[in-house]
Image (cartoon, helix red, strand yellow):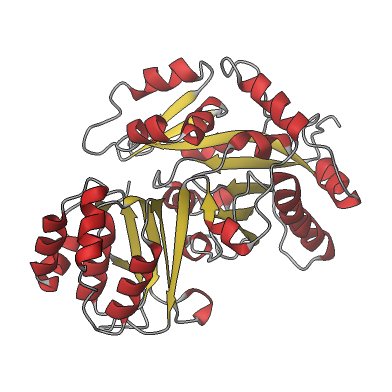
Amino acid sequence: MRHTNDQLPVYLLTGFLGAGKTTLLNRLMQDDGLKDSALVINEFGLVPIDHDLVQEGREAPMVTTTGCICCTAGSDLRSSLNQLLEGRKSGALPPFSRVIIETTGLADPAPIINSLIPGGIDARSWADHAVARAFRLSAVITVVNVEGIESALANHPESLRQIAFADHAVLTHTGISGVGDWPVRLRAVNPGLQVHNATAPDADLVRLFAPGSYQAFGKGEGVEGWLAAEARAGAHEHHGNFDGLNRHGDVVAVPLITDRPMAQAALAEFLKRISTHPGNVLLRAKGLVGLTDDPSRPAVVHAVGHRIYPIQRQDGWPGGTAQSRLVVIGTGLNEGRIRGDFDRLALGKGAAKPGLSAIMQSFVRGGRAVDDVSARLESASEIASRIGGRVTSRD
């Protein structure tokens, strides 16, 4: 089906874990020109977090999907868009002029794009046909963390494809090192890419949402071939169980929930442990955690790799439900230990000390058990004092 001018534009906001997609979305939703946007927030794992972190424009229609949107693109994404379409037609949702889809950081954009462009994944229902008539993909916007993209490109092919398929790249975390040579390097992957510095004083990121129609042409070798291959294969599927929604290849999401407020020193201890424990490769941790000093104002938690960002407080709990929700994403994670440490610290008890078997496993993995022991000897108050001053803001 050909795109027409009366179709609603859809913008795909992607970027690897920790790039700053939600931060950018919050910034964009403060602009009056984007207030009439509907949002589709895709989250990796069964416990949704990101929809609670979107602060601005909460009056806008919002749909949350969990799991890997690229693995179920032909069904979940079209279903989400159909929910918005039906709500708009019935008057149950306020009017909106565009849809912004924020993907999980592990999403491969090819199957998502194929579910939104003519000639992509076949429609499987009347609802799919209705979505095809009502919406068109206008642009793909990829957020690139200049401090972490080198490692992401080396270890996660999704990050390369997110750049290869993009119309725009928004560079974040440029405050210390600047943009460097990343505009040139990114255009070597995607010659048609427009590169923007999110922290530049004259950055006008709202113009990224100008009307248009997505085109694969001019985006570098392989893009059109990747789309054709994905269309032939159709949307790939998960394993058909809930555990599969917390996994994407070797990457696992460990969701953590508690109704009990936690001391800030205990939270600091937990974040330090998951970011430094031998064998853990922490990619991302994020969520809202109630603290004992003021349980009504949840702490916003962000960590990327070994960097723990300063804790900020929200004025209240989204939806009025005071429940701590945290997700830890990475490879090689000891899920049992992470859950056990979180539960013990939430109860005001110390984290578990490693037994002989755990120490031996650390050596087998190439880690140094002595580091784990010395980390435990550091007082929680010292860790808490550093958590607010060791890094700059997220963007």
Name which residue lies at 47% across and 19% down: 189
Q: Is residue 351 left or right of residue 338?
A: left
- For this rendering, which residue is in front, 13 or 202? 13
- For this rendering, which residue is in front, 77 or 3? 77
In the rendered image, the vertical position of residue 176 relative to residue 66, given as above or below: above
Name which residue lies at 53% across and 30% down: 161
Name which residue lies at 33% across and 83% down: 261
Quadrant (top left/top right/bottom left/bottom right) for the N terminus: top right
- For this rendering, which residue is in front, 215 or 378? 378
In the rendered image, the vertical position of residue 20 relative to residue 232, given as above or below: below
Name which residue lies at 62% across and 22% down: 223
- For this rendering, which residue is in front, 375 or 59? 375
Residue 363 position in % (x across, y down): 20, 51
Q: Quadrant of residue 327?
A: bottom left
Can the viewer see residue 306? yes
In the rendered image, the vertical position of residue 35 relative to residue 110, given as above or below: below
Residue 387 position in % (x across, y down): 19, 62
